[in-house]
Structures are given as structure tokens and as C-alpha cells.
Amino acid sequence: MSTDTPAPTESVAQRYVAAQRSDDFVQLRRTLRRFVFPMTAAFFGWYALYVILSAYARDFMATKLIGNINVALIFGLLQFVSTFLIAWVYARYAGRRIDPLADRVRADMGEVTHEHGPRG
Amino acid sequence: MSTVRAAEATAVLAAEAGNANTARTLTIVLFVLLVVVTLGLTIWASRQTKTATDFYAGGRSFSGFQNGMAIGGDYMSAASFLGIAGIIALYGYDGFLYSIGFLVAWLVALLLVAELLRNSGRYTMADVLAFRMRQRPVRTAAAVSTITVSIFYLLAQMVGAGALVALLLGIKPDTTFLGMSAHTAKVATIILVGALMIIYVTVGGMKGTTYVQIIKAALLMGGTLVMTLLVLAHYDFNLSALLGDAAGASGKGDAFLEPGLRYGVEVAGNAQQTFYNKMDLLSLGVALVLGTAGLPHILIRFYTVPTAKAARKSVLWAIGIIGTFYLFTLALGFGAAALVGREAIVAQDLAGNTAAPQLAEALGFDFFGGEIGGAAMLAIIAAVAFATILAVVAGLTLASSSSLAHDFYANVVKKGQASERQEVRVARISAFGIGAIAIVLSIFAQSLNVAFLVALAFAVAASGNLPAILYSLFWRRFNTSGAVWAIYGGLIAAVGLVFFSPVVSGAPTSMFPDSDWQWFPLSNPGLISIPVGFLCGWIGTVISKENDADKYAELEVRSLTGAGAH
């Protein structure tokens, strides 16, 4: 937890630099990046695999599985499934791990958390 | 299936006159209704539009769900609805690649951009790019790229509207409608669509535009859901039977269900062309997935909600809505291939852009009492297509006029000294000017391919905007020089490569088929221009000593926590 209490005389820049160095913020950044960077690499790789197979593995993609439904169609539909799944997993992760940390950093900075957020 | 096609053929022959009139009247009635409702909402929204925040960001008062719907309305363009259905109907499986790329792209927005942008910006994409930089060069660059991307996209939609109307109103080359030839009707439609989008934006601002987009999303989802269910019902919900029938009717057999008929085509005996075709497929794939998070008209939608959590929720809703819609495109495309048939589609429109409305007519004929049912379904789907185009062009006009007023006028010309009232007035004038320019360009650009213009807009957005956005948010060292290099480098690479590609010259299908200055072999520049954008951003950064650590601290804390958010 940060022990910095924003003094009235503190400049805006000092306030943000102090917040950036606080333990809570360092943990917030790590928690966010630990999820979004690997996940971005994963879905991009998975999508790239699909595009590359479409270009270079035509025989594999043409393999029929059930009736006229082939690997290409299933692979494409799996891209939908993975997109929905990643979105859902991220929403859960953000709600449980990221939001509480962000709220804490904001509270430490002396900002009121508005239920409906700031306007203007 | 053969009964449907045969019946439809008879219907077309026998009822050309009578039912064309019924469909036409119904189309016009529905279209007028749509215009009246959306204009009414726009005027109502204008009464609540008092401040700059109201005009640019709808007062940040929309809920996650409302904004998710509006994002869907902003994103699912005529290229998606008509274009993808058309490509699947004519080339089969390859059209599905667009659906997948357009959807997966939303993960970039969800994981890396939406919430951070919402927390740290106010009205435009440049608010984030210029946050810790010198304002004038970065905002100028951002305004240039915003307007470039939006104009390409805008042209695609308006040209599409013009191309469709003659077909939807059933105007043949040698007949007239209200005394207008097909060409006059196209021009009239472009002017009408342009005038409406100017009104939505200048009068209703972001609030009015958002309501138009929400209505459009509901209409489009409803219309395509019904069509999808009817197609599946026709095959007793047996997907394999639908695919088999589509493959059979296409005359291509199983190849119709596999990648390779349209993109990455293997040319026998020409290894080099085969290689280029496959590279072009990869290039398209990369541009689609990286373009979305750099589209200014999509990015400014995140400012219409109060918090980052609401921005996240709106992207989640958008992914659900857009993903469902792109699943429907499979049924629409393969359904059109099977139930309308390649011959009938190509006879109407070589690019297949009318496959979806034609499918609606065939389904209406099949399920709802013959010719009248067919005419009614055609009219309804035609009105949905108009709504689709209107919502997207309004979003694009708003994005470019916001950037012109907020980035260029207020922060470059007036150096941040403009009053809110002045800024909004300039935004309204800009919307009028950009709308007028778009109308004129669209009239002259009618021969351009719609899908190409949209794919180009995606490539330009991914090359010019995305590198600068990601560097801004995540790279401490990034600076003014880096941002300017990234934007202009990516922009020039993307537009320049297209200029020297077979799309513009040197091939029978080029814009200038009789000239040849082509040397770049791919029609989509993304594979080269996106890395160029990232590389330029890096070079520009390291050759400059500027580095404001305090401002980065402010940006990082604000973007991750929402402290000090507008």
C-alpha cells in the first residue's frame, strides 16, 4: 500500500509520478500486462495459424469431417469460439483482479470513485 | 431447392412489372418511415446537446449495452452485410475469412485499447496520441490520418449506396423511375444519403448519431436473424445439406467449401503469381485483424460511456452482437449461392453485392405466399441496407469533423485557445464540408470496388494509427518525433503501395487498366505497410532526445486507473 498522502501543495506531475511509483500501481501494471500481452500473442498466433493454413494447407483444410462440413469450416468457427471465450475470460479477470487494484490506486490518490464516473 | 429457383425465375419473368412496383412502393414507404423516425430522434437529441462533450461524446451518458449496440451499428457496414454475403455467394468459403478477421480484430480493441483510451482521452483519437507530446505536429498528423481513413471508408459506403439503389428500386438500364435513369437515380441517392448524414451529425451530434446506429443495429440483427432462420428452415436445420446444395449450385463442387477460389489462388505453372496470391491473402488477413483498433470512428465511440468499465462492457456486447452477425453471413452467403444461384446474382451485380437482397426475395417467395411475400421481404431488407449505410456514414462524418475541429482547429490553429462554443460550431461546419466533399468524390468514384475501399481503409488504419496508439499507451520512451514518424510513415507506406499495386494500374481489373506503373505485386499493402508503421515509430523515437517521463507517468496512471478521467 502506498503511504503517500497527496498534500494540497503537491503539483499534478508529482502526484502522478508518486502514484506511478506506488506498490499498488506497480502491481496493477504487472497484473494487466501479465494477462493482455500473452493473451494478445496467443490469439494473434492462433488467428495467424488459421490464415496460414488457409493459404498453404489446402488439403488439410479440405478434409471432410461430418457430411459436407470440413476442417476449414470448423477451424473458422473455432475462431469465433476462441474470441468469445477470451472476451469472457478477460472480463472475469479484469473484474476480479484489475478493477480492485485500479480503485485502490485511485483512492490512494484521493479521488472519489463515482458510481457513474466523471462527466464532462 | 430447384423448386425455389424455378419458381423464382418464373416470378421474375411474370411479375416484373406488378411486383417490382409493390416492392418499390414498400421500399420507399419503409425508407421514408426510417428517415422520419431517425430525424425525429436526431432533433430530440439536439435539444439535449448543449456542451462540447454532448456534441463529441453524447454527454458520456450511454450505457455499456447501448454503446455496444451503437458500435455494432457503426461497424457492420454495407461491406459486411452486402459485401461478405456476396463474396461467399460467388466464391464460397473465402468470404468467411472477412467475417473471422473483422471479429477477431475486436480482441485487440478489448485487451489493448478500449479502456485505456477511454480513461485518458476526451473526444478524439489524437487526445491520447498527443497526450505527452508537442500538440501541434502530432494533432496535425492524427487529423490527416483520421480524415484519410474516414474518407476511404465513407466513399465505400456511399458508392455502395448508389450502386444498390438502382437494383433495389428495380431500375433497369433502359427504364426510368420518377423520370430518373439508373445513373441519375444513383447520383440522387448519393446526394440523399450525404444530406441525411450531414443532418444527423450537424443537428444531433454524437447523441443523434448513436441513436441512429442503435436503431440500425437492431434492424440489421433482426433482418439477418429472420433470413438465417428461413435459410436453415429450408434445409430442416441441416447445415451439411445447405453446404452441399450451395456447392452443387456453384458449379465448383467441394472447392466452393474450401479456401482458395478468391484469395491465395494457385495458378498452375506460375509459381511466382501463386506466391504473390498467397502473400496477398496473408496481407489481407493481417490488415483485417489489426485495422479495427485504429479506426477513428470506432475509437471515439469509447468516449460515449462514463467509465472504463462501461467501455469494456460495450466492447463485450459489441463482440457478442458482431460475432453473431458474422455467423449469420455464412447462412446468407451459402443460402444465396444455393437458393438464388450464381447466374441470377451475377446478372444483377458482377461483384455479388445484391446477393443478400436477392436471397431475401427468394425466401419471401418461398415462405410468405409467393410474389407478394418476395416483394415484401426484398423491401424490408432493402430498407435495412439503407439503414446500415446511413448509420455508418454518420459515424464516419462525425469522426472526421470532430478531428478537424478538436485536433486541427482548436489545438493547432487556435493553439488550445478556442472556446467550446467556437469548437462545436467549427465541428458542425466541418461535418457539412466533409459531407459535401464525400458526396462529390462518391459521384466520381462510382466505378471503384466497394470491398477494396474498405480493406484499404483497414490497412491504412492499421499502418498509420495502430502503431502510434500502442506505442503511446505502452512505451515509456515514445515521443513527438516517434508519433509523427509512425503516423506519416504508416500512412504513406499504405497509400503509396496501393498506388503502385495492380489495384490502381497494370491489370485488366485496375482502376486505370490502360496504364501501367505497377511494381508492387500485392493488392493489400498491410503485410508491408503495418511493419513499416511500427518501424518508423521506433526510428522516429530513437533519433529524438525528447522524453517527458512526468507526462508518461500521468498518462500511464490515468489510462490504467481512470484517475482524472474526463
Image (cartoon, coloured by chain):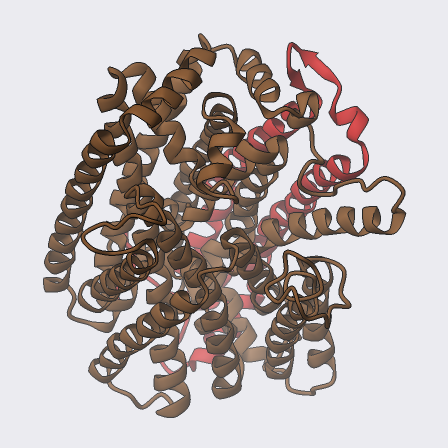
Chain colours: A red, B brown
Is residue B303 in view? no
* Quarter assignment of residue B249: top right
In depth, the one of B326 and A108 nearer the eye is B326
User: Which quadrant does the C terminus of chain B fall into?
Assistant: bottom left
Question: Is B509 placed left or right of B63 in the picture?
Answer: right
Please state the horizontal and vertical placement of residue B265, each as a whole percent of the image. 75, 41
In this view, B425 is above or below A30: below
In depth, the one of B219 and B272 nearer the eye is B272
Q: Which residue is at 31% across, 52% downward?
A: B391
Question: Is B385 placed left or right of B532 in the picture?
Answer: left
Q: Which residue is at 47% across, 31% downward?
A: B344
Q: Which residue is at 36% across, 20% downward?
A: B10
Please state the horizontal and vertical placement of residue B280, each as a whole percent of the image. 72, 51
Is residue A69 in view? yes
Most extreme residue toward the front is: B174
In this view, B124 is above or below B109: below
Please state the horizontal and vertical placement of residue B212, each as a whole percent of the image. 24, 51
Question: Is B510 placed left or right of B551 in the picture?
Answer: right
In depth, the one of B121 and B562 nearer the eye is B121
Please state the horizontal and vertical placement of residue B549, each as a whole percent of the image. 60, 78
In this view, B498 is above or below B142: above
Q: Which residue is at 73% across, 62% downward?
A: B528
Count the numbered circles shown: 0
